[in-house]
């Protein structure tokens, strides 16, 4: 009977009155990195994390841009049947992310709280209970919750097990992809979080963000993708921020009147949205502000001639 399976267990509703607000516990004298798990998948991995079909699972969240990067890369790398994925609920309390009705139970371990995956990996784990988290069925633990290297490993380490739609991390472009990341990660990916504020930091972040969007707009006037002639990790990393811009970070137009102010960038974002890897991994309802108006992502992008 499905009702009796341990894998259909679900967490009780998020309830901060009972469980408190989610809080990151960090010892001031703890030199360990905040994102504690950073294992890498590699045929010659000293830790034994070899690429194998069916071995790994991604705990993701539809709402989370960092998890979204990883689910897009997974799709572009052709890993739908090689690396499984499931989604935690969009809301949390002091217990951290949890599995609830909205996106179903944990299909791998039957955990009700993502915390259980972290505690299975390290006893009394007190760091971030974050998504994305890459779970290994063989060692029964989290390999990594470092989103950047999870994406790189999905893009590069499973080639012999799948037919990638595109190589999103081609060797010849890696340097340029990471150079862009050094600029865009603080200014755009993180900058949007501060740019709507009215304090000094907000003003500074807003100026830097709008400058960066203008520079990107110019760059994309003459090239279809950020680097090279195909979709790369650079596009994936930028896009998850762009798709949230009008409905989340700038939902109340505190930063600028909207992404359409940068017509090439906006068309570029719509062009990527035509790809199932981007479209099918996007659930606007998981991140849009309740009163946000979702712009027309289906408007033709006309980018083939760029
Ligand atoms: N900031 C993380 C990215 C992942 C992240 O922040 N995920 C959010 C959801 S979008 C989360 O799970 N946060 C809980 C936490 O970090 O404790 C990192 O740098 O690795």
Image (cartoon, rainbow, N blue to C red):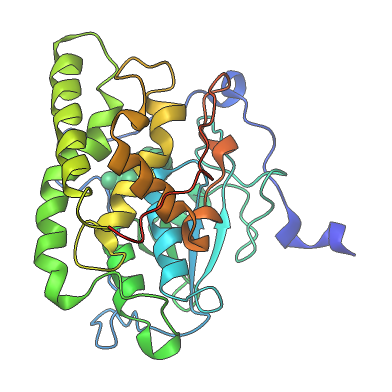
Question: Is residue 256 depicted above or below 72 in this figure?
Answer: above
The image position of residue 170, as x and y in percent, is: 21, 75
In this rendering, position of residue 20 left or right of residue 185: right
Provide residue 107's location: percent of width, then percent of height: 65, 63
Q: Residue at x 36, y 75 (%)?
A: 166
Which residue is depicted at the point 14% across and 39% down? 215
Choose between 127 and 229: the one closer to the eye: 229
The answer to which quarter of the image holds residue 265 is: top left
- Position of residue 271 measured from the top left corner of the image (x, y, whole percent): 41, 53
Residue placed at 41% from the left, 79% from the top? Answer: 164
Residue projecting furthest to the front: 305
Q: Nearer the viewer, residue 306 or 262?
A: 306
Q: Is residue 33 above or below residue 139?
A: above
Classify the position of the N terminus by image quarter.
bottom right
Residue at the bottom extreme of this rendering:
160
Q: Residue at x 33, y 14 (%)?
A: 254
Direction right: furthest residue? 1
Q: How many marks?
A: 0
């Amino acid at each position: 009977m499905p009702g009796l399976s341990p894998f259909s267990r679900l967490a009780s509703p998020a309830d901060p009155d009972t469980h408190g607000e989610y809080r990151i516990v960090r010892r001031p004298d703890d030199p360990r990195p905040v994102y504690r798990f950073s294992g890498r998948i590699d045929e010659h991995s000293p830790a034994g994390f070899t690429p194998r079909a069916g071995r790994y699972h991604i705990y993701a969240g539809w709402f989370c841009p960092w998890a979204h990067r990883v689910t897009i890369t997974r799709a572009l790398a052709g890993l739908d049947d090689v690396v499984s994925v499931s989604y935690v609920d969009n809301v949390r309390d002091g217990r951290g992310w949890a599995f609830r009705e909205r996106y179903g139970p944990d299909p791998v371990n039957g955990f009700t709280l993502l915390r259980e995956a972290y505690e299975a990996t390290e006893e009394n784990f007190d760091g971030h209970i974050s998504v994305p988290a890459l779970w290994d069925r063989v060692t029964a633990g989290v390999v990594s919750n470092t989103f950047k290297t999870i994406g790189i490993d999905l893009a590069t380490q499973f080639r012999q097990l799948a037919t990638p739609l595109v190589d999103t991390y081609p060797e010849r472009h890696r340097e340029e992809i990471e150079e862009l990341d050094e600029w865009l990660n603080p200014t755009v990916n993180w900058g949007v979080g501060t740019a709507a504020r009215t304090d000094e930091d907000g003003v500074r972040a807003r100026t830097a963000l709008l400058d960066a969007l203008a520079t990107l707009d110019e760059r994309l006037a003459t090239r279809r993708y950020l680097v090279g002639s195909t979709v790369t990790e650079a596009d994936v990393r930028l896009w998850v921020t762009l798709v949230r811009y009008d409905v989340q970070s700038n939902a109340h137009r505190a930063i600028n009147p909207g992404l359409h102010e940068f017509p090439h960038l906006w068309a570029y974002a719509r062009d990527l949205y035509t790809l199932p890897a981007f479209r099918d991994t996007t659930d606007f309802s998981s991140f849009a502000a309740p009163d946000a108006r979702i712009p027309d992502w289906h408007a033709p992008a006309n980018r083939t001639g760029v």
